Image (tube, rainbow, N blue to C red):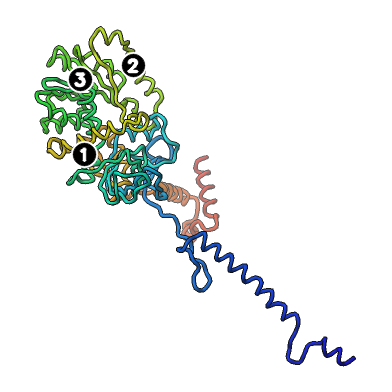
Amino acid sequence: MAEDKNETSPSAEGEKPPQEAAPSKQEKEEPKENKEEEKKVEENGDGDKPKENGEEKPTPEPKDMRAIVLNGFGGLKSVKALRKPEPTLSEGEVLIRVKACGLNFQDLMARQGAIDSPPKTPFIMGSECAGDIEQVGEGVENFKVGDRVVALPDHKAWAELVAVPATSVFALPAGMSYLDAAAITMNYTVAYILLFELANLTPGKNLLLHSAGGGVGQAVVQLAKTVKDVTIFGVCSKSKHEALKATGTIDHILERGADYSNEVRKISPEGVDIVLDCLCGEECNKGYALLKPMGKYILYGSSNVVTGETKSFFSAARSWWQVDKVSPIKLFDENKTLSGLNLRHLMYQHGSHAFVRRAVERVFALWNEGKIKPVVDSTWALEDVPEAMQKMHDRKNIGKIVLDPSLEPKPKPATPAKGKTKDKKAASQESQEKKASSVESEEGEKKKEPELTNGTSEDKSDSDSKEKESS
């Protein structure tokens, strides 16, 4: 019996059966852990292998970038400089590191939601940028990494990086700066199509140009002057007349809002050959009435729709209702032509990328020949784009407004807080009340009385003021 007890009881050396079973359980669990670690390595790739001490490397956070984001359609307060994730490439796209951006009137209309089929907010704004290609997507053959390009995307241009379809990207000629590219591409391409594809400008003709001091207006003036004996009637704000007269490129400068039709008739009684209108509204009727036989009226914008900081349905309706309905029979009888140009639709709805590319290449060739030179009104940091938009909205720019992501934003002026001024006024009123109440109370008690700590003095002053008001 003693021998049986010795076999079943623990030995003197401490060999216990439960402790022998525990290691075997750990040995069974270790292969599971190893399999899980191997599985994670297979999923994450070589870059996410576990460290030597068994801890896994943290997964890298997605990179972000600066971008100008429209949070909601409306005023300038909806335009914000935010950090957004860097874009990823799709097939047929290139990734551009942005060095310069262009501000166009189309961007003001997009901010207000006054364009057709705008993207849902929030979205990155901008329709023109220039920079270097950092990545090339699958299927792109005509561009490579490092190429200097300019792009006309349908939004998303105002950011440090932008992914753009290669069909909307154009190689820069040697020697053209990024800022010049952002000032030239859209404006001069629109102007080139207006004059040479639609209006068929030839020597000896005259034309009436609205918004002559703007970016497209200045592009039209320069391109028109490449043709001999062309007379330009330029309509613009009175504040721009002196600066435009100094350039000597516009033959007759007329005041916007005045009776410019009568002024044109005094100089050219028979009218004009071409009317280029970016305003719409009642200007359409005036422009059509000024056309000679065989004349061409071309609408390329509707900036009269943008009257205030936010979209106005009344302004839009009024702008369109003011336009007379012209039947084809009338055009036939009067030998006149009505036409239009919407570059955004031409590229992104009608798919005429090859046509636009030929126009851009012709513009770049004229720049290489020294026949055109972009007129830059001002350059702004990305963060200052609301102020730049306000300048364009007020029609104060002469030439193109461009954005430079490398610029530091302007320091915001220090304004005194409204609360502090209110506190000062309240303090002065309280002091006057205290002086008035000192007639009824003892001066010694007032000197000892602490400031508003437990609310007793406040209650007292309130009661004193009430007694004063009742008296």
Upstream in sequence: badge 2 or badge 1:
2
| Apparent side of residue 21 relative to residue 99 in the rendered image (left or right) | right
Q: Where residue 170 sits: x, y (%)? A: 27, 41
| Apparent side of residue 117 relative to residue 274 in the rendered image (left or right) | right
Which residue: 12% across, 23% down?
230
- Front in this rendered view, residue 83 or 119: 119
Q: Quadrant of residue 121?
A: top left
Residue 177 visible: yes
Kind of residue sitting beneath label 2: Gln
| Secondary structure category for the residue under label 2 | loop
Residue 112 badge: none
Q: Where residue 335 sits: x, y (%)? A: 23, 11
**Residue under label 2:** 322
Q: Where residue 182 sits: x, y (%)? A: 25, 41
Compared to 410, does 202 lie above or below?
above
**Residue under label 3:** 274
Kind of residue sitting beneath label 1: Asp
Compared to 439, does 106 lie above or below?
above
Q: Distance between the residues labelled 2 and 3?
A: 21 Å
Q: Distance between the residues labelled 2 and 1?
A: 32 Å
Upstream in sequence: badge 2 or badge 3:
3
Q: Quadrant of residue 302?
A: top left
Please name which of the two marks, 2 or 3, marks the residue nearer to the observer: 3
| Secondary structure category for the residue under label 1 | strand
Q: Which residue lies furthest to the right in this view?
A: 1
Compared to 152, does 84 lie above or below?
below
Please name which of the two marks, 1 or 3, marks the residue nearer to the observer: 3
**Residue under label 1:** 377
Upstream in sequence: badge 1 or badge 3:
3
